[in-house]
Image: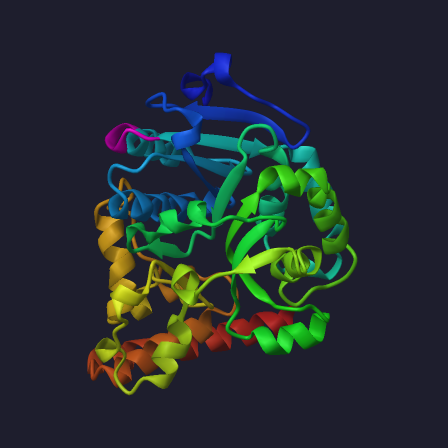
Amino acid sequence: MNLDKFVDRSEEKVNKYVDKVIKLKQKNIEEENLKHILLCGDKNYVKYIGITLTSILLANKGCDFEFHIFIDSILEEDLSRLKLTAESFSVSINIYFINSDVIKQFSKDMHGNDHISVAAYFRFIAFGALYKIVDKVLYLDSDICVLDDKINDFWKVDLLDKIAIVIRDKSGEASEIRLNVDRYFNSGVIFVDVNQWNELDLTSKCIEKACEKVWPFLDQDVLNLILDKKFIIVEKRYNYECSLSRLIDDADKPSEVVIDKNKVTVLHYIGASKPWHTWVQCCPVAQLWVNVKKGSCWEDISLASPSQIKKQTYKYFHKAARVSLKEHVWMDVIKNHVLYVYWKVRYFLNLGIS
């Protein structure tokens, strides 16, 4: 893939964490007026990064954001779409390619965490790599949809001697006991004072801690340990956790479950089922994300079916069958049950062969 045509060499910045930076710069804005937002992922997640980014822009027209995306690589198609997004919204997007040697070292040191994408480490690197580039940055996971302009509230909080602003995790109490921390937060949304982070060399400390052992919630556990007592907690509207898997399991009819959008700024789709999965499309809360997708440069990408899930595919056909049953879509009930049986037999036959 030829990326050079997109690179502004005069503006390229490289440090020990980053091999290359592509700057899709659209306009010059005084630094004090800019709000910096960080997104991370591997090449397969760039399309979801783009849709999260678009949700921010659609809900915050006229606000001055600059985006920083940390990735391992990128498909030329996604790069073109990011360029079009920057042009359409007149916004600057910086794409950082993480040093391949750093990624190799992480992969080697992940111990029992090799079932988790190495991209889980990227935010650790990003907070270090952004030193002397930005002062403060809002990190968002890419399974997020921003619904309103209250996201700007992060920049209004006085951090005082704290390093971050976070939102407490739904399962906080159990994890507080497990890790012996004061408060346990969900790391999908975290506002960081980059200068304080780097003065305490927290990138190195996070990497060292991540490689110590198998952490149940890898990057989230590590961040909670490293930042213990060093953060401010704000209300859950800024990281409203929504489990689509739990919703379709618990609801009598998933299509009738709605959320009060007036109480949600950052909608975070936690769990295995995501709004880009076909089996949750009856859910109004998933359609909030789909509507953003329609207004983005990724409007034509297909939703992901159970057959596209690489591990334990049969479980996702089972989810689809249960949703079809609850929604009384009888032909889909039959189809998804047949596929569930097929993929389950295939899975256990492969286990026997291996």
At x 28%, y 53%, the residue is: 148
In the image, taking residue 118 as reference, residue 347 lies left or right, namely: left
Whether residue 318 is visible:
no
The span picked out in magenta is: 87-91
**Residue 268 locus on image (x, y percent):** 41, 61
Membership of 110 in magenta stretch: no
At x 70%, y 60%, the residue is: 225
Picture mark count: 0
In the image, taking residue 41 as reference, residue 100 lies left or right, namely: right
In-front residue for pair 121/80? 121
In-front residue for pair 334/196? 196
In-front residue for pair 226/346? 226
In-front residue for pair 3/138? 138
Whether residue 190 is visible:
yes
Membership of 88 in magenta stretch: yes
- Compared with 75, 60 (above or below) is below
Single out the residue that lies furthest toward the top: 10
**Residue 43 locus on image (x, y percent):** 48, 42
- Quarter placement of the C terminus: bottom right
Give the quadrant of residue 89: top left
At x 24%, y 62%, the residue is: 287
**Residue 90 locus on image (x, y percent):** 28, 29
**Residue 57 locus on image (x, y percent):** 29, 42
* Colouring rule applied to residues: rainbow
- Compared with 107, 243 (above or below) is below
At x 43%, y 30%, the residue is: 32
Q: Is the stretch drawn in magenta largely helix, strand or loop?
A: helix
